[in-house]
Image (cartoon, rainbow, N blue to C red):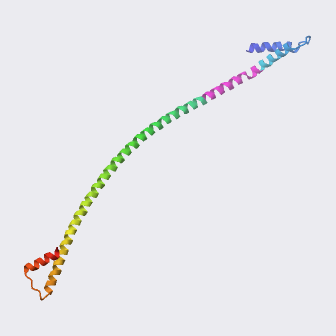
Amino acid sequence: MKKILFTLLCLSPLALFANEHGGTDILQRTINFFIFAAIMYYLLADKAKEYFANRTSSIQAELDKVQDMLKQSKAEVDNAKKELDDAKVLANEIIELAKNDQDKIKTSILESVENEIKHLQSSFDNKLSSETKKITRDVVEEVLEELLKSDNMELSQNDLAEIVLKKVA
């Protein structure tokens, strides 16, 4: 490259001092252009190569960074899907347990209510029997008091028993 540049620099005075005998100076302009391009290349080639190398490496670094982020995102999506599936399974298990608990609670409440009804029925029967006996005693006592207060009536034991039975019935 340096040889080409040196050659162009040596030939440049020829192009500069060329006579104008013809009608066009295309050859001189072409040589001047190549000389200019060679000088520019000589001055800017290393900087341009360095710039483009740095730019390429920075683009590659960004691309690697984006690919790493993409891989990480895919891994997170996979983990999220797995956690979602696990959560669905857990939710189904919880629902099944809740249904089982609901059935158990319903059964225990029904048993408790039935036991309470039996207890209340038994209590009612006992109370009814007790009240019936109490009322019977009160009626018998009332009848006896009427009979005892009445002086003109004489009754035998059998008559008294029949009256009491009639009154009670």
Residue that appears at 20% across and 75% down? 135
Quarter of the image for the C terminus: give it: bottom left
Q: Determine if the magenta segment contains residue 123.
A: no
Q: Quadrant of residue 38?
A: top right
* Residue at 21% over, 66% down: 125
Rendering quarter of residue 130: bottom left
Residue 9 occupies quadrant: top right
Magenta span contains residue 41: yes
145 relative to 58 in the view: left or right: left
Farthest bottom residue in view = 151
In this rendering, is residue 96 above or below 14? below
Question: Residue visible at 36% across and 44% down?
Answer: 96
32 vs 82, left or right, is: right
Q: Nearer the viewer, residue 128 or 64?
A: 128
The answer to whether 26 is drawn above or below residue 84 in the figure is above
Q: Which residues are magenta?
A: 40-61
Quarter of the N terminus within the rendering: top right
